Amino acid sequence: MIKLLVSQAELLKGLNAVAAAVPPRTNLPALTNILVEAGHDQLKLAATDLDTTITTSVAATVTTPGAVAIPGRKLHEIVRELPEADVHISGTGNRISINCGESSFIIAGSARDSYPELPSKVDASSTTIPLPVLSSAIRRTSFAVAREDYRPALNGELWKLGPEGLEMVATDGHRLARIHLEDVTAPSFFEAIVAPKALGLLARMAEEGDVSVSFQGTQMSFEFGTTTIFSRTIEGPYPPYEKVIPHDNDKTLTISREDLNSALRRMRIIANPATHQVKLSLESGNILVQAENADAGEAKEKLEGEYSGEAVQVGFNADFLMEILKNMTGDRIVMKLKNSSSAVVLENETPEQGVSHLSLLMPVRLPGVTG
């Protein structure tokens, strides 16, 4: 039995937070539910897909404490459409009554013991990070996480935290993003591969303030405000990414990030829709972006920028390059190249204080171009 009173706005805010953890498809029907627990002057909401769990709490007037599992999508839809007034929730496990204003619903629920046990916060190694800093770091790296790669470690983001700072790395074999935050430290060293779903939820849900990040065995947790995201880590080891970052690229292109990105968008209209291949032809005083397609035609655009080094032609997947540019922060960026087949490094022209950020992109082979 459960009986409580909660404002529609607060309940919707809580459901918005946890609903992202409800799996769209699952072989376990219990996971489509949201757990509703009424305790002392608060309502706790939780959802899980067994790998990622989100819990949050909102203020409520509780007459009868208890817990029930309610179909998550249905509950979310109902509350979203209710007027901004008090919501009365009551009932037993299999019959839940929801009343607000002149609207009333009765939906089927299930008992608390039908829902999986939730992870709990434990005494563990932890650190506190400003939310805007962490959200920015996630955005600038997580785009490079692999999607369903046969190497499980690449399907997550490597975190290395210790006295010298926090390093976050993601790669899918075609591109790599790495950021190092020297001001985010912990007294002891910790390393984990974090699932991208938890990072995406954190970057999307978090606002101002701090997040407490805790590590314990195969679990990480991110706590901010009244909300906590729990995530299972991915088994490693992570590939030795340091070995693929070149340090002898002697050709440099310095250019406006927006100018290059805009040109790539235009070239992509003509580029082969299967490969999205564009070509950069670089020599002193001449920076040219081109795309060719036997069916669609060809396009080219000359750009303003500074290039130093021998003339070189290099091909890229335009989508990959644009995604890197989108997640950089400087107005002007530096591309460091060696030849047409070696990895290219991209960085901001002006370094950020306390932050080291670079992206790496593998070129695509151009017909008739060697070296």
Image (spheres, rainbow, N blue to C red):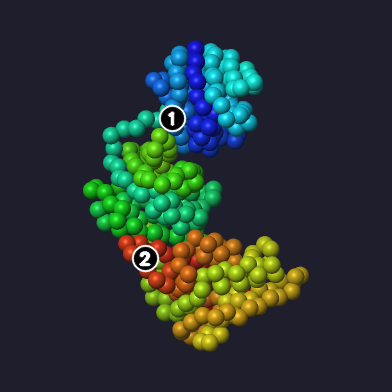
Q: Is residue 236 visible?
A: no
Per the model, the C-alpha gap separating discs 2 and 1 is 37 Å
Residue for point 30% across, 45% down: 127
Residue 172 is left or right of residue 275, and the answer is left
Residue for point 48% across, 43% down: 205
Q: Is residue 197 visible?
A: yes
Residue 39, given in percent of the width and then of the height, sits at 41, 20
Q: Nearer the viewer, mark 2 or mark 1?
A: 1
Residue 145 is left or right of residue 265, and the answer is left
Mark 2 sits on what residue? Answer: 352
Dividing the picture into quadrants, the one containing residue 85 is: top right
Q: Is residue 244 above or below residue 97?
A: below
Q: Is residue 45 above or below residue 133?
A: above
Dot 1 falls on a residue whose secondary structure is strand
Residue 4, given in percent of the width and then of the height, sits at 49, 18
Residue type, mark 1 in image? Ser
Q: Nearer the viewer, residue 263 or 277?
A: 263
Residue for point 45% across, 24% down: 60
Label 1 packing within 10 angstroms: few (<14), some (14-19), many (20+) = many
Mark 1 sits on what residue? Answer: 57
Label 2 packing within 10 angstroms: few (<14), some (14-19), many (20+) = few
Residue 280, given in percent of the width and then of the height, sits at 57, 76
Residue type, mark 2 in image? Glu
Q: Nearer the viewer, residue 322 or 153?
A: 322
Q: Is residue 79 above or below residue 169?
A: above
Residue 366, given in percent of the width and then of the height, sits at 60, 74
Q: Nearer the viewer, residue 162 or 42?
A: 42
Dot 2 falls on a residue whose secondary structure is loop
Residue at the extreme left of the image, as rendered: 187
Dividing the picture into quadrants, the one containing residue 269 is: bottom right
Q: Earlier in the sequence, mark 2 or mark 1?
A: 1
